[in-house]
Image (cartoon, helix red, strand yellow):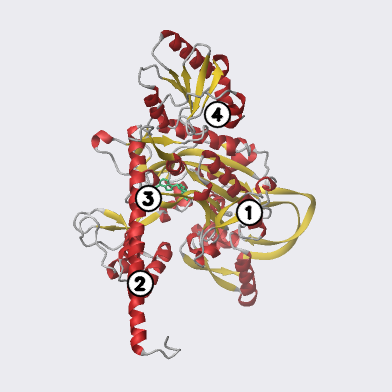
Amino acid sequence: MASSGAPKSHIDAAVQSLNVLKLDKASIKTQLQSAVSSNTDAFRQALVNTLERRLFYIPSFKIYRGVAGLYDYGPPGCAVKSNVLAFWRQHFVLEENMLEVDCPCVTPEIVLKASGHVDKFTDLMVKDDKTGTCYRADHLIKDYCKEKLDKDLTMTPEKAAELKHVLAILDDLSAEDLGAKIKEYGITAPDTKNHLSHPYPFNLMFQTSIGPSGFSPGYMRPETAQGIFVNFKDLYYYNGNKLPFAAAQIGQAFRNEISPRQGLLRVREFTLAEIEHFVDPQDKSHPKFSEISSLEFLMFPREEQMSGQSAKRLQIGEAVSQGIVNNETLGYFIGRVYLFLTRLGIDKERLRFRQHLANEMAHYAADCWDAEIECSYGWIECVGIADRSAYDLSAHSDKSGVALVAQEKFPEPREVEKLVIAPVKKELGLAFKGNQKMVTEALEAMDEKVALEMKADLESKGEVEFHVCTLGKNVTVKKNMVSISKEKKKEHQRVFTPSVIEPSFGIGRIIYCLFEHAFYLRPSKAGDEQLNVFCFPPLVAPIKCTVFPLVQNQQYEEVAKFISKLLTAAGISHKIDITGTSIGKRYARTDELGVPFAITVDSTTSVTIRERDSKDQIRVNVENVASVVKEVTDGQSTWDDALKTYPLHSSGSAED
Ligand code: AMP
């Protein structure tokens, strides 16, 4: 308007209307958000009530008021967990011939010192100055920024941009930065509004001591991976000294989370299923890559995240060939994880693979992707898939003195130029006496660049100052104490530290997301009630089928027991319910446990099978019923096939 010469009064009026519209827009956005979040809260409440009432899980030590971050699985939860783990073993361990191990949870300090956990496995914590209650510093800042962005209608665009930026770089902020932000934003303890301490690192490992002396410190393992790394030498030998190969482990992990929240998603003891796939760093191709290369799913590469775009559908084959995913083996596991999660029943539209930003990755990692599943808490990391290069094996080689390496034998010997460092022990002994061993070891451990610089200095000056880490000081090395040369040698093999590609599955997180994706409410026929249903695929369902005599009658009970025997012989988990409760109530009770099929005995020769979600029923002879259920639950055929083969039972509304 200004450029077309409109009068100032018109411009002012237009600006004013724009401001009103802006406020309207912000208030509609807030109303929408609060409608969505109250829906989400109601959904979560209904789900959690059902899960706890039907004993899928139970807060641990409940009669003593429980402990935050610790949960028990009850009977149906245990069955779901064991189905998920059985499928994990089939889909990964069996399919890839992985070497499964089972290592102790109690781990000596030296192992976790070598892996870096003793020094670095920390979160930054703040304490309520008066009550001593602890909080994660980054969580408080995250909550503050999100709340302001959601609810503060008067915020300027500059302030909003600043808060968004803080959210984006939160993982990068040091203790000092976080402390400064807490001060700047006036953040106080959420429960008491008391002043907070400065942030300081808190190690998440549970410490213990091994044996009665108290001299042998240990920790409860924070991950299962270290058990595999320390066994590398034996596993490599077991595998016929051949690469690539993978080892796998399922077991408990322990993390003393500062303030566990989000139910089963952030707990202090949980089941991890981890794979360590060892591969030659010079060849990260995968022989079975073509089997998954055409899979297409939501991926969220680094570039899209940085430029504020959303996740996009990509073919994994293309993602690897375009260099978005670092290598074929990493891509192969991303594809296999996608198949694993979707076959369990995770909704593929609410599953994405997010690449770590450069600041999230450890310096040694080549590339990392998280399988994130969307649930009522947002997008949650459920599986981490990382190319950790040679870091872990090198760290344990250095600390233990045992070479965790692989060899590649050459068909023909190859001539190579090698650096030879030969310390002259006699001279070193005379000069350094008791320290001779440490000086010798430090000289032998020099890398090529340092050694060649020393050679040049010794030749020009005759002596050189040399720092020996293990002595914590410099010593003077003279020309007669060491000979450094480059020699041509014939080599018959290449010795190298393998790279490791690690998919790491948080089983509890996957199960919780499965619960969310499978849960729905449907109105009862009378419309007076909402009935809870879990639409678990048969693979996951805690019980595959129920057997109900329609009415209490001895003949029907005999048939029900006969069918139960057939189901047991076929290895199908089932439940027989001979109570006289109405059939509709019995169906509703088992729908709430996610049982996919119900057999109702309403005659002595044939029975009906009802499918949980469609409520369709077919009529099948008593002798055939177990094999029909087995075929459909094992995935050899589908319910649609059964519908085509067997007559539909038309009085299918018996339950209502
Ligand atoms: P990380 O080693 O931190 O990458 O964790 C590996 C996997 O463990 C993650 O992808 C999560 O699924 C799971 N996880 C990590 N911390 C917790 C926790 N406190 N509670 C439940 N699962 C967790």
Q: Which mark is residue 633?
A: 4
Q: Is mark 2 within 8 Å of ligand 1?
A: no
Badge 2 element: helix
SS of the residue under disc 3: loop
Instruction: Give how far apart the Cα atoms at labels 3 and 1 are.
Output: 38 Å
Residue matched to label 2? 21
In the image, residue 312 lies at what x, y percent? 56, 58
Q: Is residue 570 above or below residue 312?
A: above
Foreground: 429 or 253? Answer: 253
Check residue 315 in the rendering and tell me which mark sits there, or answer none: 1
Badge 1 density bin: few <14, some 14–19, many ≥20, Cα 10 Å: some
The residues tagged by marks 4 and 1 sit, at their Cα atoms, a distance apart of 30 Å
Which SS class for mark 1?
strand
Gap between marks 2 and 1 measured at Cα? 42 Å
Q: Quadrant of the N terminus?
A: bottom left
Quarter of the rendering occupied by the C terminus:
top left
2 and 3 marks in contact (CB < 8 Å): no
Which numbered disc, 3 or 1, marks the residue that appears first in the sequence? Answer: 3
The residue beneath circle 3 is: 204
Quadrant of the image occupied by residue 73: top left
Distance in Å between CA atoms under marks 4 and 3: 42 Å
Query: As rendered, which of 600 and 355 lies closer to the eye?
Result: 600
- Between disc 2 and disc 1, whose residue precedes? 2
